[in-house]
């Protein structure tokens, strides 16, 4: 059966502590154990459903993480207090001193500043390339490269990355393809096209009401557990934790994402067509005039946002 991310979200059923149709919100920083053994097991990551301390995980954050993992078709996900709070720990978990990243040159300004100005202080170097030129991408990879980084639809230039071709290059060189999918939730599913790790700023479409920042990393169970590891996990130790009350409110907004994305796309196409007709220079991947149209259009058409 064809993967439909909107259905994957709606099919999740959670019930609250008292049978509520929404999960109960966990309003605690720390948790109690009825036996000492359970506490040790939880520390080791061997006690499913038990909680230690909310920087590690909390029921509300796990619910939102599960819903976003279902949306991206990955095994697991970890939510963060902002998009940058998902991107930077993910890259720092994958790379250390001496490692190298190949990144698209057209990425979100904060991510670019992190890679250009901040991560070199930790001994991590980045080569920025034109992500639409596969020969340029491949020739930038060295024996030190650990990560290939891009955005599905870039902010703000709306450049389209060919995720399937980039995934082939990443597999060939045994490096991780990390994709920021902030601009195309539900429209494109990078993990289904071969990406290893998919990141979102929830601040934009996913939460959608401009009332909070948020972020998520979607990946294998193994990688998500490593981010939360009490001894060496970047999310656990750097601490960009989302508040439980907030993650419950983002979860409620996620329920309407499929309807909002449809309308956003409709509105954007309407404006792009009118602007183009008026003779303005328009950059929009829905238009035939866009260089990435051939990559984006078939993926969009195969997606029915409604149930
Ligand atoms: C906004 C944005 C981010 C950063 O997210 P914050 O929630 O502001 O930290 C990262 N990537 C993209 C593509 C964005 O648009």
Image: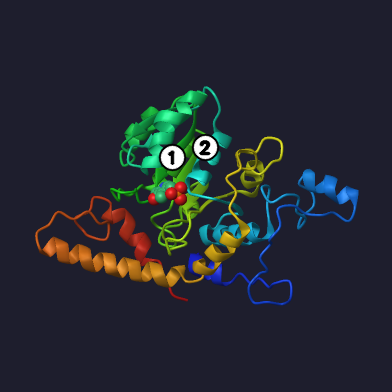
Of residue 212 and residue 170, the one placed in the foreground of this image is 212
Residue at (47, 52) in percent of width and height: 200
Instruction: Answer left or right for 101 relative to 229.
Output: left
Q: Which of the 4 image quarters holds residue 60?
A: bottom right
Name the spot of residue 246 as percent of width and height, x first.
56, 60
Residue 18 in percent (x, y) is at 74, 76
The reply to whether the C-beta atoms of the residues labelled 1 and 2 are less than 8 Å apart is yes
Residues packed near mark 2 inside 10 Å, few (<14), some (14 to 19) or many (20 plus): some
Q: Nearer the viewer, residue 229 or 287?
A: 229
- 137 displayed left or right of 290: right
Residue 71 visible in the current orientation = yes
CA distance separating discs 1 and 2: 9 Å
x, y percent for residue 112:
38, 37
Q: Residue 91: which disc?
A: 2
Which residue shows up at 54% across the image and 31% down it? 95
* Residue situated furthest left in the rendering: 279
Question: Compared to 249, does 29 lie above or below?
Answer: above
Question: Relative to 289, is 135 on the left or the right?
Answer: right
In this rendering, position of residue 279 left or right of residue 35:
left
Q: Nearer the viewer, mark 1 or mark 2?
A: 2
Q: Which residue is mark 1?
A: 149
Provide the secondary structure element on which disc 1 rests. strand
- The residue carrying pointer 1 sits among few (fewer than 14), some (14 to 19) or many (20 or more) residues within 10 Å by Cα, namely many
Q: Nearer the viewer, residue 180 or 208?
A: 208
Q: Nearer the viewer, residue 118 or 266?
A: 118
Whether residue 121 is situated above or below residue 110 in the rendered picture = above
Residue in the image at 52% along x and 57% along y = 72
Residue 2 visible? The answer is no
């Amino acid at each position: 059966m064809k993967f439909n991310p909107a259905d994957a979200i709606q099919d999740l059923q959670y019930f609250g502590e008292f049978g509520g149709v929404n999960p109960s919100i966990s309003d605690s920083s720390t948790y109690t154990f009825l036996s000492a053994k359970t506490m040790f097991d939880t520390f080791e990551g061997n006690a499913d459903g038990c909680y230690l301390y909310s920087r590690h995980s909390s029921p509300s954050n796990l619910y939102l993480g599960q819903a976003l993992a279902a949306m991206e078709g990955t095994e697991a996900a970890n939510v963060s207090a902002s998009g940058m709070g998902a991107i930077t720990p993910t890259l720092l978990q994958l790379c250390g001193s001496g490692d190298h990243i190949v990144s698209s040159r057209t990425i979100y300004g904060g991510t670019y500043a992190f890679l250009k100005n901040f991560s070199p202080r930790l001994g991590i170097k980045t080569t920025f390339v034109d992500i639409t030129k596969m020969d340029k991408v491949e020739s930038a990879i060295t024996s030190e490269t650990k990560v290939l980084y891009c955005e599905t639809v870039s902010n703000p230039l709306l450049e389209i990355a060919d995720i399937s071709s980039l995934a082939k290059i990443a597999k060939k060189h045994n490096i991780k393809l990390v994709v920021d999918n902030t601009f195309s939730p539900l429209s494109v599913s990078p993990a289904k096209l071969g990406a290893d790790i998919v990141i979102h700023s929830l601040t934009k479409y996913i939460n959608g009401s401009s009332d909070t920042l948020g972020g998520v990393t979607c990946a294998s169970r193994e990688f998500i557990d490593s981010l939360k590891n009490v001894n060496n996990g970047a999310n656990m130790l750097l601490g960009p934790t989302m508040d439980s009350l907030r993650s419950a409110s983002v979860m409620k907004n996620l329920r309407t994402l499929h309807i909002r994305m449809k309308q956003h796309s409709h509105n954007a196409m309407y404006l792009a067509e009118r602007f183009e007709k008026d003779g303005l220079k328009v950059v929009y991947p829905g238009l035939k005039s866009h260089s990435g149209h051939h990559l984006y259009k078939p993926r969009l058409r195969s997606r029915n946002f409604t149930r």
